Image: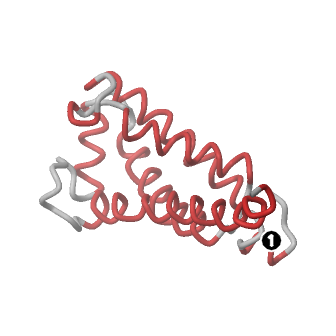
Amino acid sequence: MSSLFQTLAPFAEALLRVAVGLALVPHGLRNTFGFFPNTGVRALNLRDLAKQLDHDGYRPGGFWAPAISVTQLVGGPLLALGLFTRPVAAVVLIFLLVADVERWRVGRYFWNKLGLEYTLMWTIATFTVLVHGGGLYSLDHLLGWDF
């Protein structure tokens, strides 16, 4: 079984990296351009996101709102492709750690109470991508980069 798992490991790492990257994109589309309006969020554009961030104590919201959008809309696809994997994963990890703190503040642990359960899983997945890098099936590997 060991050789089977060693054979599957690069595919599993790529699948996790792609899932982490692509999971960010719908959030960025929602917060930036108003996609998926009936998903329970208050902010459907950068201006509203900036106001929400200011209200929640993440000031200046006018700086953080576009930073979040870039993290999600640029960082997500870069992770999915495995391009600049470790630097992007580090930025996403910091973003998710802040989200974890906020989720804990709002609802403690359970996801159905807006707690950190859901974001914590993505944080752990992102940390795994950071540690392993782009892997065999990534643009980083194809280009000979080891970030």
Q: Residue at x 28, y 48 (%)?
A: 49
Q: Quadrant of residue 26?
A: bottom left
Name of the residue lying farthest toward the bottom: 142
Residue found at the far front of this picture: 1
Quadrant showing the C terminus: bottom right
From the top left corner, tell me how far across and down residue 10 is, in percent.
72, 65
Name the residue at 15% across, 49% down: 40
**Image quarter in which the N terminus is found:** bottom right
The residue at 70%/53% (across/down) is 87
Left-right relation of 82 to 136: left
The crowd level at tag 1 (other Cα within 10 Å; few <14, some 14-19, many 20+) is some
Q: Classify 36 as above or below 109.
A: below
Q: Is residue 115 above or below residue 50?
A: above
Q: Which residue is mark 1?
A: 141
Q: Residue at x 29, y 57 (%)?
A: 31
Q: Position of residue 82 (x, y in %)?
A: 67, 67
Q: Nearer the viewer, residue 118 or 36?
A: 118
SS at mark 1?
helix
Which amino acid does the dot numbered 1 rest on? His
Looking at the image, is 43 positioned above or below residue 105? below
Is residue 119 shown left or right of residue 112?
A: right
Front in this rendered view, residue 52 or 13: 13
Q: Residue furthest right?
A: 144
Residue 74 in picture, x, y percent from top left:
52, 65
Q: Position of residue 125 (x, y in %)?
A: 56, 47
